[in-house]
Image: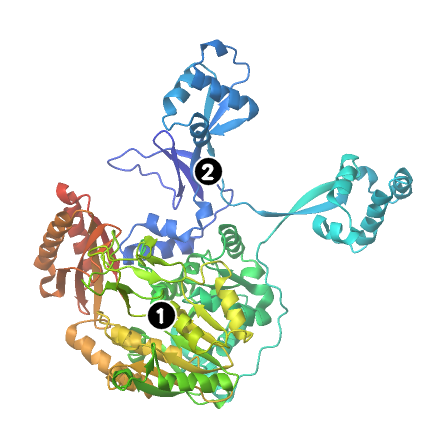
Amino acid sequence: MRVAVEFGKSKIYTALVAEIHNVPPVGYEAKDIHQILDETPIVNEIQLKHWEWIASYYMCSVGEVFRAALPSAFLLESETIIQYITGFSNEKELSDEEFLIIEALQFQPQLSVNQIVAILGKKTVFPIIKDLIEKNAIVVKEQIYEQYKPKLIKYLRLTKEWSSNEKLSELLELLSRAKKQREIILTYFQLSTTKKPIKVSEFQEESNSSSSVLKSLIDKGIFEYYYITTDRINFEGNTSEIKELTTHQQEAFKQIKISFETKQVTLLKGITSSGKTEIYVKLIKKSLDEGKQVLYLLPEIALTTQLIGRLQEYFGEYLSVFHSKYSMNERVEVWNNVLENKQKARLVLGARSSLFLPFSNLGLLIVDEEHEPSFKQYDPAPRYHARDAAIVLANKHNANVLLGSATPSIETFYNAQQGKYGFVELNRRFGDVLLPEIELVDIKEKHRKKQMIGHFSDRLIEMITDALENKEQVILFQNRRGFAPVIECELCGISPQCPDCDVSLTFHSYKKELRCHYCGYRQAMLHNCGACGSEKLNTKGFGTEQLEIELEQLFPDFKIGRMDFDTTRGKFGYQKIIGQFEAQEIDILVGTQMLSKGLDFGNVSLVGILNADNMLNFPDFRAHERSYQLMVQVSGRAGRSKTRGKVAIQTYNPYHQILQQVSTNNFNEMYKEQLEERWQYHYPPFYRIIKITLRHKDFNKVEEGAQWLGKSLMSIFKENVLGPTTPGVSKIRNYYIRNVIIKIPQNQQLTTTKNKITRVKNAFQAVKEFRSIKLNIDVDNY
């Protein structure tokens, strides 16, 4: 259960009692428990064991996991509350400021410290409060407040005095002169025949009455209000019949069931649009019929919007959704429903944080698009990978895990090849539609021949025009938001930089401002160069916003939509854009990688990738694997229903081996090549990686600390230590950054390695000069 623990005079924190024992701690005096906050446990034992595993594996504290796992409404904070002591008479002794506080307290039963600060218009109020306490004028109490407020619906009923049938005629007689009030009573009796509670809002609509007439009946003691707590999220929908699987899907479904008998984890490698979701639905139904809970993990919130609709049809009364776009109160309700194993939360659809929900009877975990980097949490701790943590959670529940993807990550595919996971393949698209035809457009050649209009080659424009003439939709992919990533002065070549980070500012033309995508810093667009004063400022590179503007000029008669971080900020941001695109209100949709994740649009016949080289030339050992996955996934959005789709990839290097493999959809060749490289250069899946990041506002201090740490680790791990190195972006939010990477071979024990790293970390933090350096450890940094 949760308890409140007091630290210092005014701070109260929420803690969790994980076990009860009689062994007093050594070396410090334990704090008293201020009060117990729960009547029944809000977490269960399996959760605690899972949290402990996450903390030990990802090298963080259980407290950090606890803070990440619990919805913030459960983490109570304290607020110092001041109350007036009635009967205080020595008002003459008070100073002007003290008198102001006492006067305010006579109008209000209690005030918080923040309110007193506002009344006096000064920040140092504690001495004044202290004097008032000594004069016995006020009392201070610590009030713990719950942030979660249940949603209450207002209902109407007759008071006990008038609720019997015999009283009806007497009541109508009493109101014979008040025509409107009499009509309201008659409407009430009509509605009460349904035996359902009567909502005030619906009653007012039905009786066509104003709130003042209703109030007068309440004042007369005829009606009274009462409240019923209701859940904020309810998914209507009758469990309809599940679609029949095609022969290929049926075969895959059978193989998965057989695989689950011997292997806990199975990988389903099904090409894009092969109908993996239908197989998931069958497996979910099987688990729900056995009375088990199911967790369906998705990498991106954008995906849940489409899937909710599909799953609602089949499992309306079982479905709950859990992710950060839902409000705090809605998340608390899902938590409580899962804890009580209620029917409406037996199937949970969510992003990576839904792993932490209090499941008690989990039967199946589905990790869809398991290759996605979004499953990895980078900041703050715990820096867990949802796919790996899900496998451990399933183990604790003795449940099965199905990993699904058209382009599995190299680690997962390697585990399947080694026989650690079961493996099932689905190579036919639903309805036997062929995979899209992929065309590589050489823009180096197009630039030379002057066949480019803005950022579009003549070939891509021709393909877009054909698709639009056939009343089909187009998706264009560019993994950069904003208008242009760099603004450069033509005379001196200097570009505006973020004052707090080591990056240039991105231009957003919609708001005419320059923005940093790392820390959120923004400033108005410059009219002349800050260095030399020249007015000749040029944009370099292009983002989704620039494409949207160019498309509006090229295709003025068609509706252009944009889907990126800027356009999907609100709770319903995704729903709005996806809904419009599905309803064919948008003809061309431009977007970032959000578009690549498993979305299903029937009328898209063309996908354009505007700059493939950006991804390929990224300084990361996963750049080629990620580029392949991203391009194949984006291509998979084309031609999903009837006819074969088309994909155009614009590139300066059409002969690059990854682009060739994408055009022939050759996953196995890409896998073999990447595996060889990983073996040669000691990277996963053969070596594990632990990355240590050091951050400090003082450049010299972080440099000195990194050198010390690097040498200490090298003395233990020898050539398996890389660094200290400076990352591509070496300063974020005014903090200078250094990285040290440790590679762990397969024959080296992970636990021993972590213990050695912890010892070095403790020694590092014991050095007085380095104590202020922030040190983060990221296990399995991929």
In terms of image quadrants, where is residue 691? Answer: bottom left
Within 10 angstroms of label 1, few (less than 14), some, or many (20 or more) residues?
A: many
Name the residue located 31 percent from the left edge and 76 percent from the top edge.
611
Mark 1 and 2 residues: CB-CB less than 8 Å, in contact?
no
Q: Is residue 127 above or below residue 627?
A: above
Name which residue type carries label 2: Ile
The residue labelled by disc 2 is 36
SS of the residue under disc 2: strand
- Expressed as whole percent of the image width and height from the top left, the position of residue 104 reads 52, 23
Residue 77 location (% of width, % of height)? 42, 39
Q: Which residue is mark 1?
A: 372
- Report the front residue among 515 and 228: 515
Counting from the top left corner in percent of width and height, residue 49 is at 37, 55
Q: Is residue 364 visible?
A: no
Residue 457 placement: quadrant: bottom left
Question: Is 717 displayed left or right of 472 in the figure?
Answer: left
Query: Dividing the picture into quarters, in which one does residue 628 lie?
Result: bottom left
Instruction: Name the disc covering residue 108, or none.
Output: none
Left or right: 175, with 574 as reference point: right
Earlier-in-chain disc, 1 versus 2: 2
Please indicate whether residue 105 sits to the left or right of residue 126 in the image.
right
Report whether residue 500 is seen: yes
Relative to 45, 757 lies left or right:
left
- Above or below for 454 versus 349: below
Residue 526 appears at what percent x and percent y?
A: 30, 56
Tell me the element at label 1.
Answer: loop
- Disc 2 crowd rating (10 Å Cα; few below 14, some 14-19, many 20+) is some
The residues bearing labels 1 and 2 have C-alpha atoms spaced at a distance of: 41 Å
Q: Nearer the viewer, residue 275 or 630?
A: 630
User: Which amino acid type is shown beneath numbered disc 1?
Assistant: Glu
Residue under the image location 38 percent in, 62 percent down: 509
